[in-house]
């Protein structure tokens, strides 16, 4: 789905969000905050970083990114009139990714 050139910017944005979520997960595991690096790497905007700073528990930040990703993808799929089963599959993948990050947090906290 969303494979045509018309969706190229959406796909690029999702890739950037995915990379940002991994970086935020690593930062949380190391208990460091380098949010400005995400702007320097062109993965997030200043306003997105400012929004993420509101989350004082740094483990929440990568999960927020996955919520953003799911929202962008579902909006694009709705606009493209993608069949509901495909949309549901994407939602499930995003939720699985979020749950995976929560599991990583749980194992590192024990």
Image (cartoon, grey):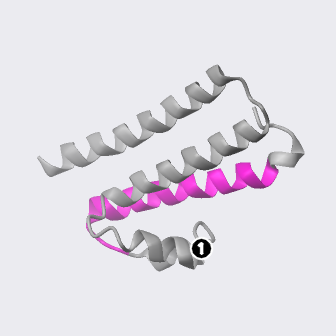
Q: Quadrant of the N terminus?
A: top right
What type of secondary structure mainly makes up the magenta span? helix
Residue at the left extreme, as displayed: 110
85 or 27: nearer the eye?
85
Q: Residue furthest right?
A: 5
Asked if residue 5 lies in the magenta stretch, the reply is no
SS for callout 1: loop
Q: Between 32 and 85, which is closer to the camera in this rendering?
A: 85
| Residue 103 figure quarter | top left
Q: Which sits in the foreground, 32 or 71?
A: 71
The span shown in magenta is 8-33
The quadrant in which residue 97 appears is top left
Q: Residue at x 36, y 38 (%)?
A: 100
Q: Residue 29 appears at what percent x and percent y?
A: 28, 58
Up the image or down, 43 lies above or below 89; here it is below
* Residue at 46% from the left image edge and 54% from the top image edge: 22
Q: Residue 67: x percent and y percent?
A: 48, 49
Q: Which residue is mark 1?
A: 45
Residue at 49% of width from left, 29% of height from top?
A: 92
Q: What is the quadrant of residue 80 in the picture?
A: top right
Relative to 70, residue 24 above or below: below
* Image x and y of residue 27, in percent: 35, 65
- Image height of 83 relative to 39, above or below: above
Q: Residues within 10 Å of mark 1 (few under 14, many from 20)?
A: some
Q: Residue at x 25, y 48 (%)?
A: 105
Return the x and y of residue 54 as percentages of the image width and height. Answer: 36, 72
């Amino acid at each position: 789905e969303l494979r045509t050139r018309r969706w190229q910017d959406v796909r690029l944005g999702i890739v950037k969000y995915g990379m940002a979520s991994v970086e935020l997960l690593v930062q949380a595991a190391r208990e460091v905050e380098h949010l400005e690096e995400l702007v320097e790497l062109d993965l997030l905007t200043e306003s997105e970083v400012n929004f993420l700073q509101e989350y004082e528990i740094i483990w929440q930040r990568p999960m927020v990114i996955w919520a953003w990703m799911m929202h962008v993808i579902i909006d694009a799929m709705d606009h493209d009139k993608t069949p509901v089963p495909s949309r549901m599959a994407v939602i499930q993948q995003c939720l699985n990714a979020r749950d995976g990050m929560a599991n990583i947090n749980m194992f590192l906290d024990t």
